[in-house]
Image (spheres, rainbow, N blue to C red):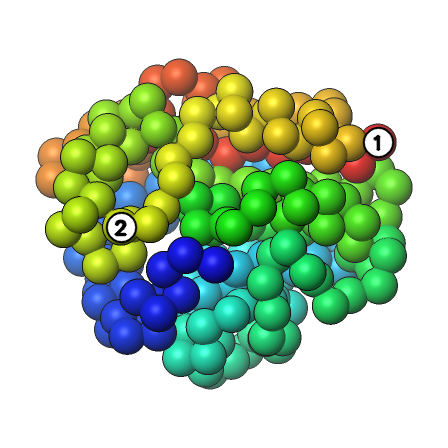
Amino acid sequence: MPGVNAFDKNVDRYEQWFVDNPLAYVSELRALRELLPTKGKGIEIGVGTGRFAAPLEIRKGIEPSRPMAEVARKRGIEVVPGVAEHLPFADGEFDHALMVTTVCFLDDLDMAFQEARRVLKTGGSFVIGFVDRESPLGKEYQARKDKSAFYQDATFYTAEDIVSHLQKAGFGEFAFRQTLFRSLTELEEVEPVKEGHGEGSFVVVRGDKQ
């Protein structure tokens, strides 16, 4: 997985982003909550430090970075070492799966999505939060990739890209939410959450296992 070493070495910098950008963080959480099921057994794929799993009450995650996983465990998350392309779980083990910003660091998007589908029950939901490549924030991140500790090897996607790969993996019944309609430096309050995509920089898409 590209960037794992970067996350290993920059846990404190990763955590500081949430401290420095609380309005953006809360906006993203609100968008995710609108599409994430509240019942059943969930897993976050690429749980990181547990910044999303913990407040969203997902108690299990998979994470390749040991230093990141150590922080997540302190937040009460049961973390299993591993990568999205080879999930160490049984078929149909979960009711829903979450993936936040992890898509841009995957080695093989199709394999990861197929694995997510495999570990979900029929009708289970796969919820993905990501920065849209064509959004202002997506363009900003791409413009300074070479100077970023985290995004040097990242691949950014549009909402259409994500849906296309989800369909290929066997997901359907899609729903969308979006937030972050202004620059992070311009935020004065928590951003609204709207349906659809194409306006907000942070997009959430949910697809159900068919």
Is residue 122 visible in the rendered image? The answer is yes
- Where is residue 182 drawn, in percent x and y? 21, 28
Which label number is shown at residue 152?
Answer: 2
* Amino acid at the residue labelled 1: Gln
Whether residue 8 is situated above or below residue 137 in the rendered picture: below
Front residue of 33/15: it is 15
Quarter occupied by residue 194: top left
> Mark 1 near mark 2, Cβ–Cβ under 8 Å?
no
Residue 202 shows up from this direction: no
In screen coordinates, is 68 left or right of 184? right
Mark 1 surroundings: few (<14), some (14-19) or many (≥20) residues within 10 A? some
The percent coordinates of residue 100 (x first, y second) are 48, 49
Viewer-nearest residue: 31 or 47: 47
N-terminal of the pair, mark 1 or mark 2, is 2
Identify the image quadrant of residue 104: top left
- Tell me the amino acid under the disc marked 2: Gln
> What is the secondary structure assignment of the residue under circle 2?
loop
Q: Position of residue 36 (x, y in %)?
A: 62, 43
- Left or right: 202, with 62 as reference point: left
Which residue is found at the position 51% from the left and 80% from the top? 73
Find numbered disc 1 in the image and state the secondary structure of the residue it sits on.
loop
The CA span between labels 1 and 2 is 35 Å
Q: What residue would you read off at disc 1? A: 210
- Front label number (1 vs 2): 2
* Residue 24 image label: none
